[in-house]
Amino acid sequence: MIKKIIYSFPIAAVLFFSTGCGEDKTSSTNGLAIDKATQKKIIAEAPVLTPQESLSAMKTENGFEVKLVASEPLISAPVALNFDDKGRIWALEMQGYMPDTAGHGENIPDGKVIILEDKNGDGVMDDRKVFLDSLVLPRALCLVENGLLVAEPPKLWYVEINNDRAGKKILVDSAYTVGGNVEHQPNGLLRGIDNWIYNANSTKRYRKKGDQWLVERTHQRGQWGISQDDFGRLYYNNNSQNLIGDYFLPALGSGNENQRGVSGYNVDIVKDNKVYPIRPTTGVNRGYMEKILDDSSRLVEFTAACGPLVYRGGLFGKAYHENVFVAEPSANLIKRNILEEKGYITEGKQAYSGREFLASIDERFRPVSLYDGPDGAMYVVDMYRGIIQHRTYLTDYLKKEIIKRALSKPLNCGRIYKVIPAGKTTKPVLMPHDPAELVHLLGYGNGWVRDKAQQMLVDGKYTSLAPELRKNLKESDDPVTITHSLWTLEGLGVLQYEDLAPLLKHADWRVRAEALAAASSVVKANNYKQFAAAMQQMIAGNDTLTVPYIAFQLHCISAFSQSMADELWMSIAGKYPDNRYIADALISNIEKKENIFYKKIQAIEPDTNLVINRRFEKTFADIKKNEFNKNISLLKKQFPKGAQVFQNICKTCHGDDGNGLPSLAPPLNQSSWVVGDKRKLIAIALYGLTGPVTVNNKTYKAPEISGEMPGMINNDELGEEDIAQVLSFIRKNWSNKADAVSAGEVIKVKQKFNGRQKPFTIDELNAW
């Protein structure tokens, strides 16, 4: 029976609590406008709300409103989207995610790529086409040339588009995701300003060149969602950290496989991880633990941070330009962060204390991805569902919360909203077909339009526009226009030394940095001496802001003259021996030559306390950790289930090499917690670990790593033998040399702590 409740606010006179999802085309709200009694009912019962009801349950920053763009039955369980040049939305539906608390049916091929269109021009999508169906848990998409990249684990496909229908399907990468669970697999497929496609939770980047796909190694970044600023620097996060990012452009600094953790990448940009929900959030995975919820049962800090967006839409006003918005689906909110640049270093802070940019009392409001749109609005992908935690880590506590409020159904809801200034009329920019007009849009006020114009010029292979693009380089006084024009030339394959030479002397250091970053595509046998001379001149002129970029790009010179590159290398090292960013940039160029260059440095700078010497020592320690790698194939045969569990669960935070990942987890390799007392290791694996942990005399704590490691006790798919195998696998892997763990030993620890839910602390383990 449907219950009708009357309200005294103008947006919606009637609110229906539905037992299922229903179409609703009403479209705007700018604040929480529900009486107290209804608020209590929504909070207590978590009913399924229609889109308009859910809008009315939102509270936004003053001066903003939220409008509905699409909802069920037009869309279901959306997780990602792209806009095409017509302003249509290409959305990805992950319908198979967690059908129930056990995840039954996740392998059913019911995922889809759909095209949504607003045919009557009222701002609400009213037409749906299915472009691609029968997908299993698809997670990312990206429009490129006349096709679509689609990530369907473990593969990455490129599907040609023929009149909105799927054409030829080409396998780009058979191992786009290797292992990992749904929460910890690559995603994003962001077209960077440098014409490469980047991902979160991945060490790969992609680029289409003719009929071939290039795949290169890059830095590991984040967990779910990735975004870029006006100059192509990337921002991301993990589920417990508000915002992480790079100080330097993404293509740099990943050339030395021996070097782990390059300074200036994976930086904790916003250290404040507090959140301010407007409803009790007991339905979070660790809600039973102390300090997870406050006295009002509201989440204290991020537990599902995702989908960061560097807002570049231009519609919100100058104060919001390049603010970074972050989604938190577990707390039903969207946070606003403000960035401040200090040279190449970027710092950030939360925009507000004690409140959020957007928050809802609707527990099923699950913002998972955020985007700039062709109209300048911020688009919000709302998966709209009860269960958001994957079964791999689902605790018994959360299962009970799900049952209590019937959160497991329905599964066919989904919404897309847009946030705009209140009362503002918005229209999407329809991209022109005249390529000359696209060149003019490289300086447009909306970052989405600028990006799209560059992409369309590159995809269309409009090399005839090179003179107009070069005119921008010479005549524009806007660094952003120059940057887009530079990378458009690079994407078209026509960038030349003569284009970059004047930019290396540009008044804006960011333009000089972009020119240095683009040098990889331009330095050739006939011009490397000129580049080297320009670099030396910049070093001599104390151009401190671009010296890291010069250091990163010395490999461009060494490809043609090792001696000339070495001279530049020593010149930089001698001048900046105490700068960690420059030191790491230098080391990134000398894979397998670290000892040679360390001796050279020692000859002129023997002080072991100097940063460059300490960064060398760190690199040597990283090399040593991997010197005694075991025969992995043998271990996989000995512990097949253990190797599988490691791939699906452990490696996503601890890394394939067991040396830990920045912002996520400490090393397993050479860890006394791994090779020491088996009982303690079993306890950690079963129940998890929270708080600081010391490994090899180094203390790891949030935000350097995630504040908590979840246990496996609630994973119904893992028995005692499986857990014993994975622990045996890590105790014998890499440099570790310890005996195996048996299922019987796992059972004993389980019996000792029967009924325990919360993770251990180090103090508890040490007292055992």
Image (spheres, rainbow, N blue to C red):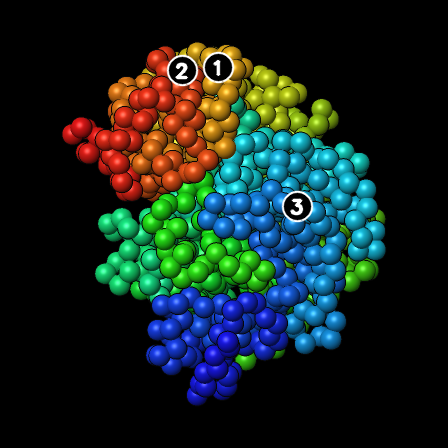
Q: Residue at x 74, y 71 (%)?
A: 119
SS class, disc 2: loop
Q: Residue at x 45, y 59 (%)?
A: 407
Please give the residue where the numbered disc 1 appears in the rendered image.
638
Amino acid under disc 1 = Gln
Q: Residue at x 35, y 31 (%)?
A: 685
- Measured in 3D between alpha carbons, the distance from the residue under mark 3 to the one under mark 1, in whole angstroms, is 33 Å
Task: From the top left corner, tell me how far across and down residue 107 is, in percent.
Answer: 60, 42
Q: Residue at x 33, y 63 (%)?
A: 280
SS class, disc 3: loop
Task: From the top left corner, tell me how far across and down residue 617 is, in percent.
Answer: 37, 20
Task: From the top left corner, tell me how far across and down residue 226 is, in percent.
Answer: 54, 48
Q: Please name which of the two marks, 2 or 1, marks the residue nearer to the observer.
A: 1
Q: Is residue 656 visible?
A: no
Q: Within the image, what quadrant is residue 268 found in?
A: top left
Q: Please name which of the two marks, 2 or 3, marks the residue nearer to the observer.
A: 3
Is 59 on the left-hand or right-hand side of 518?
left
Does label 2 or label 3 sit earlier along the sequence?
3
Amino acid under disc 2 = Lys
Is 4 on the left-hand or right-hand side of 426?
left
Q: Are marks 2 and 1 in contact (CB under 8 Å)?
A: yes
Along the line of sight, the residue nearer the viewer: 206 or 540: 206
Along the line of sight, the residue nearer the viewer: 694 or 675: 675
Q: Are marks 3 and 1 in contact (CB under 8 Å)?
A: no
Picture disc at residue 109? 3
Q: Within the image, what quadrant is residue 695 found in?
A: top left
Please give the residue where the numbered disc 2 appears in the rendered image.
732
Along the line of sight, the residue nearer the viewer: 95 or 88: 95
